[in-house]
Structure formats: C-alpha cells, structure tokens
Image: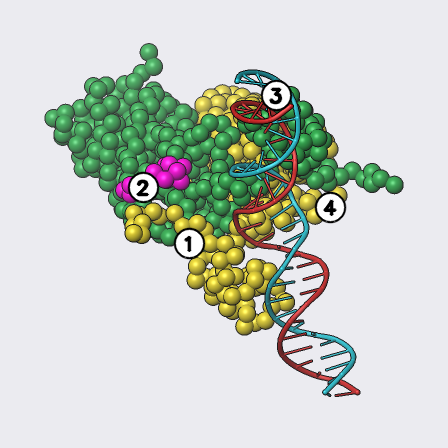
Chain colours: A green, B yellow, C red, D cyan
Amino acid sequence: MADTSPRVHATRAPTLNDVAQLAGVSMATASKAVNGRAEVAEKTRRRVLAAASEIGFTPNGLAQSLVTGRTKTVGLLTSDLEGRFVLPILMGAEDAFGSGEISVLLCDARGDRIRENYHLKALLNRRVDGIIVVGRSTDPRNSLGQQLPVPVVYAYAPSDDPRDQSLAPDNHAGGRLAVEHLISVGRRRIVHITGDPGYAAAQDRAAGFKEGMAAAGLTPVDEVMFGSWTEGWGRDATAVLLQRHPDIDGFVCGSDQIARGALETLRDFGRSVPEDVAVIGYDNWEVLATNSRPELTSIDCTLQGLGRQAAKRIFEALDGAPVAGGTELFLPKLVIRGSTIASR
Amino acid sequence: MADTSPRVHATRAPTLNDVAQLAGVSMATASKAVNGRAEVAEKTRRRVLAAASEIGFTPNGLAQSLVTGRTKTVGLLTSDLEGRFVLPILMGAEDAFGSGEISVLLCDARGDRIRENYHLKALLNRRVDGIIVVGRSTDPRNSLGQQLPVPVVYAYAPSDDPRDQSLAPDNHAGGRLAVEHLISVGRRRIVHITGDPGYAAAQDRAAGFKEGMAAAGLTPVDEVMFGSWTEGWGRDATAVLLQRHPDIDGFVCGSDQIARGALETLRDFGRSVPEDVAVIGYDNWEVLATNSRPELTSIDCTLQGLGRQAAKRIFEALDGAPVAGGTELFLPKLVIRGSTIASR
DNA sequence: TAGCTGTCCGAAAGGCGTTTCGAAAGTTTT
DNA sequence: AAAACTTTCGAAACGCCTTTCGGACAGCTA
C-alpha cells in the first residue's frame, strides 16, 4: 500500500530528534555530539555522528537562529542593475569570515524607493544580521534611518547621515594614482576626460588628477573635460582635445567606458597606443578593459575588500563594538595593461 | 542610572507577545489580527494593529518558517562571475510572485566545486524553498543529484541528468532569428562569426543560422567562423572574411563582444554600418550594445522570464505538482538598434 | 564501606509565532 | 426566561534546536 509515486523531496528533512532516536540518546546529547562539544564521550559521539550521516541530517538553521539570535546572513540592498559594483562587494562579504560561513540575500531595488522598502521589510522579517546598502554611484544617498534593529553599512555610496557607517572608494587618491602612473611612464602633456560633473566621483577624481599634476610640477594641457560616463563622450572629447592639442601624450579617463572611446578615436587619428599616447581608465571593469586593443590600464576600486570590510563591520557592531559613524575611504590600486606600457 | 550610551540596535526586536500585552489580548488573538484573519472583532483588530505599529513590530520570519515549513527564499547557485546572466535571472525570480514576496540568496561558487558544496550546505541549512542553479554557459552541467530535500531547477545551463528540470535559452531559434532579421533588411551575402566551437551555444546558434539561410534559399558566403567569445576574435575573423569576400553585406555574430570587434574592423576597412554592411550581435549585453557606434542590434535571451519561470517551477513542485524532467527552451527576442537599420 | 570527584547524559525551559479546540460572552429565537 | 446559535477570545501544543542544571554512575581515596 506504500505510495510509490516519484516524489523527490516529499521526505521531511530529518531532525535532530530522528538522529537522537536512532543513536539511542537524548536530543541534548545528540546536539552536543553534532556540535563537537566536549561533554560527550567519544564513543557516544561516534554513534551519533554515524546516525546523523546515515539519515542525512542537516541542522535546521531556522531553529538554530531562533535560539542564537544570529542568522549568519546579511542583506545586500542595491540599485546597481548591472552588478558591476555589487557583485564584487557581495563576494567580499561572502568571504569575510571564510567560505560558506555567511550568506547574502541580494535585493535589487531597481532605483525604486517603494521597492526598496519592500525589500527592507523582507530582510528584517528574515532577521538578517545586518544590511549592506550599495549605491549606484559614489554620491551620498539618503539614509535608511537610525531606527533599524540591525546594523547598516553603506558601501560604495556613503550615507548622507554622518551617524551612519559608510565605506567608499577613495576617488581622490584614485585620480592621483592614475596621473602619477602616466607621469611615471614619461608622459607630460596630459589631459583628463571624465563623466557627469554632477557626480562626486567625477569631481573627486578630477581633484586628485590636478593635485597629482601640480605635485609633479606639471600643468594640464587643457581644462578637465566633464561629460557623461559613455564611450560616445570619450570619443567626442578625445577628438576635440586632439584637434586643439595635437601633442597630447597622456589621457587620464574617468571610467573605462570613456577610455574605450578615447582609444577608438586615437585609432581614427592614427595615433598608436601606448607609443604615442598613453591611456588609463577607471573601474577596472574587466570585460571592457581586457577586450580593447591594446588592453586598458585601469584603476581598481578594490570593491571586494570593501565588501569584506562591510561584513566585518556588521558583526563587530553586533558583538557590541562601538559604532563610529562617518565614511572610511578605500585606497584603489593600479592595474597595468598595454595601454600605458608596451608589452615588451 | 539608565544606560545612555548610544546603542543603535540594542533593543531586542519586539515580538508578537509584546504586541499582545500592549493591546491586552492573547498572542493567539494578536496573531490572527496581524494576519488579517476573520475570527477577530474589528475593534480588537484595530487595537492590536495600533499596538503593533506603535512598537514597530515585524513578525519573526524564522519562527513563521519553522511553523509553515516555507521560507519564501530561494537559493541561486552560480559561477557566473560577471553577473551577466545571473542578475537578470535573479530579478526574474524576485518578481515571480510580486514585489518583496520571495527573496534570493545569491551564492557565487566561482567555478570551484568545493565552494559550490559549501554554498549548497549553507542553502540547505537555511532551509531555502528551492535552488536555482545558473551555469556559466549553455552547456549542460553536472547535476546536483536527485537526493536533495528541495526542488532544484537548472537555468541557462541545463543539467546533464534528464530527470532534472532545466530551463535554457533556445539558441537555435536565436541564430535563426538573427539571420532572418538580416535577410529582412535586404542582406544576401551573409557570414557567421561565433565563439568557441566546444560550446553548445556556438553550435546551436550556428545551426539556426544555417537553417535560416537555407530557408531563404541563400548560401552562406563562407564557412561558419568558430573562435573565441572575444572582441579580438571578432576583429580578426572579420578582417579575414573581408579580404576573402569584399562584398559581404551581413555579419551574424555569436556574441556582442564578437560583434563589437567586427564593428571595429569594419571601420578600419572603411565600410559603413549599416549602409554597406549590417551587423547583429547576441546576448543584448547593454553596456556593449548601446555604447558602440552605431549601437548594436542584438538577440536577447529573455533571461528575466527564465528566472521568473524557474521560481514558479520551484513553488509548483513544492505544492505537489508533478515534476517533469527535461529542458524547456525559451524563445529569444530581437532588439533592433542602429547596426542593422539606419536610424531614419 | 563511606565519601568524594569527575564524567556523561537527559529533562526541561526557552526562543517566536501559528493553529486547533474549547470556553465564554453575546445575540437571536421561541 | 430558557434554549440554541454565533462570535470572539485564550490556553496549549507544535515546529526544531540549544543550553542549563541536576542526576546517575564509575572510579578513586581513606
């Protein structure tokens, strides 16, 4: 009379109770054995573990969390549709405490305030240990408020409330790093093309650029060209600059997309990269940087480290560490490819 | 003597019990009121809801799940580092049952079997309602096995075990759709450049391409060019083909990257797109497709729909629907931009 | 043998909601 | 005013695991 129809997951997941019964011990003992606690005889432990693996027992994390008050899960609330920023941050968070230790609920608000709120509710309902908010740009974004029952860390885009904890890339240092690299490879007649002037990222990188030039005793060949974060703008701005100053030998670009556009126009003008002109991008977006001709030197924001730090901050706060508001800046690093140094 | 130090989230989250006490009812009644069940007087309900919102009560999803056996959470297990495939699928899954209904635990195995196993354990431990496995290519991947206690759906990359449920893009139809579009805009001398011949995606799209040509009574100008999924290959293959057949008027490319390469070489050869030659890509990867000159017509795999369907499948299986193994194919759609039709 | 220490194990409470079932209160009917 | 329903509410069990605390027992000493 048994039901023989093919039901793959009809079997209720085995519980600790099942294990205990099979091993002939109490739940308490089974729990201790499974969790490797000391107060259990080695022989008993082996018996329990055998039983556990026999029926394929996995502890029910829900029940565990109910007791411990920790879910070892963090929420990642983002509006970064392309995943360019959020995925490295996610990976960093996953790794913060070793593989498989903490899991990440990724919620994409798609730039919609209402949807963000839904997701926030869902995260709190699932009792995440904390929330990492990832913005779409490095401009400050509105705070989720101080009333949430879990720690919140803002990553990439800092919060506009200084009481919140924020982690952001150091764009100023990045701009300076970029120009210093060009100078170090012998460039002197350098310009800067970047994106929308309304973005803090554009302003900060430009400031770093100017500072780096000044520190080397150089003057930019032209004003900083603000525009948009697109290849199209990179193409157009490059054409304008080359017409005005045919002797430019270095382009610091505010994004890899802009740099791609610059490379294209340089080709059109018959300039060879990196011999005649060196080009450096920003973001180290691999799909763009490693597919261009030549490959693109770029500034990497080390977002993975930022994600790791964000997760660490959350659990520190949970452990009672004092929460210092404000923004911590992350130093970027230089990734050298063929657009600034001829590959032998 | 009160502790006045700034502790943001020291306050234990309010429980249903707190609500009940404040409203002067039992937990049972409070539960019914909060969940909008009928057996509660309207007056009482209002009192309870007022109390709930006063102390900012959010039901504890852990406890709920423990009772109901549902977490309304699915795991997304991927190795797609760039997120090109996984993010649309994630969004689709999120949306399958309306905003904020289900949440997604995103785990990136980074191509590592061991890490995948860790993540799988973590997902099962958290009692996800099901798992969506997203591959890196459309080639079949190894099955997670039939022994898991939750439904598993394979998306993008089907499982190699026909007993599993898989959802994959219809690459054959996509290849055909691409070539039909070129034919419909008057092209006749058409070639196909695609990626690694070891990929099912390359073979299937190529087969669809050939079929579409044959159906229109046309013969490809040259053999299908297999290579790699890179801009570099797109550039090189295009140069070879143009030298052999200067009169080519249509390129069907196996990926947007290849198409970008083709566009670049066409520029070098002085061909204008789309007047002299039409180019179509594949994947509709926006950052590539919308930043080229001209913008790239492409085939979109409708991954969001695929994600939605995957989530639906999981909950159907959970509700006891019979699980039919095998692969369901998703029809792609054409996204027309300037590389095939002159914009006015 | 009585007394003591140390080891190992189990009963039970706790964590937070949901649901069932029965009791109490209120309303209508006769 | 008594009987028969309805409606509304609450006690308690349940889901699964962790942890505390006390008890049982073995082994040792005096």
Residue type at mark 4 is Ala
Q: Quadrant of residue A265?
A: top left
- Which residues make up the magenta segment? A313-326
Q: Residue at x 28, y 36 (%)?
A: A328
Mark 4 crowd level (few <14, some 14–19, many ≥20, 10 Å Cα): few
Which residue is denoted by mark 2 in the rendering? A323
Query: Label 3 near label 2: C-beta < 8 Å?
Result: no
Sequence-wise, the earlier of marks 2 and 3 is 3
Based on the picture, tell me whether residue B125 belongs to the magenta stretch: no
Q: Which residue is mark 1?
A: A113
Measure the C-alpha gap from mark 2 to mark 4. Answer: 49 Å
**Chain letter, disc 4 residue:** B
| Front label number (2 vs 4) | 2
Marks 4/1 in contact by CB < 8 Å: the verdict is no
Q: Which mark is residue A105?
A: none
Residue name at image x 54 percent, y 65 percent: B25
Amino acid type for the residue under numbered disc 1: Arg
CA gap, disc 4 and disc 1: 36 Å
Q: CA distance from mark 2 to mark 3?
A: 43 Å
> How far is disc 3 from disc 1 in space, using C-alphas?
55 Å
Q: Which residue is mark 4?
A: B321
Residue occupying image coordinates x 54% and y 49%: B61
* Camera sees residue B340: no
SS category of the residue bearing label 1 = helix
In the rendered image, the vertical position of residue A343 relative to residue B131, given as above or below:
above
